[in-house]
Image (cartoon, rainbow, N blue to C red):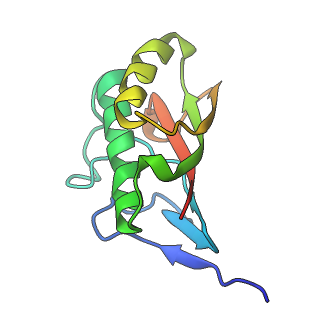
């Protein structure tokens, strides 16, 4: 029996920047779209300055999506981190470690040429119910 795809659009999240959803749930998996450091309280405002503030905002945005579904960071099984510069890896990793404190997911980190709105970091996750 095929499982139904459920669209996830948390009320507390900033609106998506394009034709995509914050997350899709199918079965016992939640696939979260990449999050950049947009403040849900001021989605049109500037991005935070610096990698530490941006990584924190990104992970807070992921937390909004996870909590909307009754999940936490311990439910994340895979994350992918996209960075404008791997020179910022240590600072991003320090912030990341504040959110993922146990039951660490598998992770990939890649440097990219650019990210939406000039962001320094974008993170996407897959979580398990």
Q: Count all numbered tags in the image, as a single digit.
A: 0
Q: Nearer the viewer, residue 11 or 3?
A: 3
Give the position of the N terminus as an image quadrant: bottom right
Q: Nearer the viewer, residue 48 or 108?
A: 108
Q: x, y (%) of residue 47?
A: 31, 36
Q: Residue at x 47, y 31 (%)?
A: 121
* Identity of the residue furthest to the front in this view: 103
Above or below residue 62? Residue 89 is above
Above or below residue 25? Residue 111 is above
Q: Is residue 34 visible?
A: yes
Q: Is residue 112 visible?
A: no
Q: Tell me where residue 119 sits by quadrant.
A: top left
Q: Tell me where residue 29 sits by quadrant.
A: bottom right
Q: Residue at x 70, y 83 (%)?
A: 3
Q: Residue at x 45, y 33 (%)?
A: 118
* Identity of the residue furthest to the top in this view: 87
* Identity of the residue furthest to the left in this view: 41
Decide if residue 115 is on the left or right side of residue 95. right
* Identity of the residue furthest to the bottom in this view: 1
Q: x, y (%) of residue 92?
A: 43, 22
Q: x, y (%) of residue 11?
A: 30, 71
Decide if residue 67 is on the left or right side of residue 121. left
Q: Nearer the viewer, residue 72 or 34?
A: 72
Above or below residue 8? Residue 80 is above
Decide if residue 56 is on the left or right side of residue 83. left
Decide if residue 42 is on the left or right side of residue 63. left
Q: x, y (%) of residue 94?
A: 39, 20
């Amino acid at each position: 029996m095929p499982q139904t795809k459920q669209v996830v659009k948390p009320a507390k999240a900033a609106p998506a920047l394009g034709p995509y959803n914050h997350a899709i749930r199918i079965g016992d998996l939640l696939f979260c779209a990449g999050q950049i450091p947009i403040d849900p309280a001021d989605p049109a405002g500037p991005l935070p300055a610096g990698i530490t503030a941006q990584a924190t905002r990104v992970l807070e945005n992921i937390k909004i999506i996870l909590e909307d579904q009754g999940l936490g960071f311990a439910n994340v099984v895979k994350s992918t981190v996209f960075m404008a510069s791997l020179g910022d890896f240590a600072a991003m990793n320090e912030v990341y470690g504040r959110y993922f404190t146990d039951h660490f997911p598998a992770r990939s980190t890649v440097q990219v040429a650019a990210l939406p709105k000039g962001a320094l970091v974008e993170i996407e996750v897959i979580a398990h119910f």
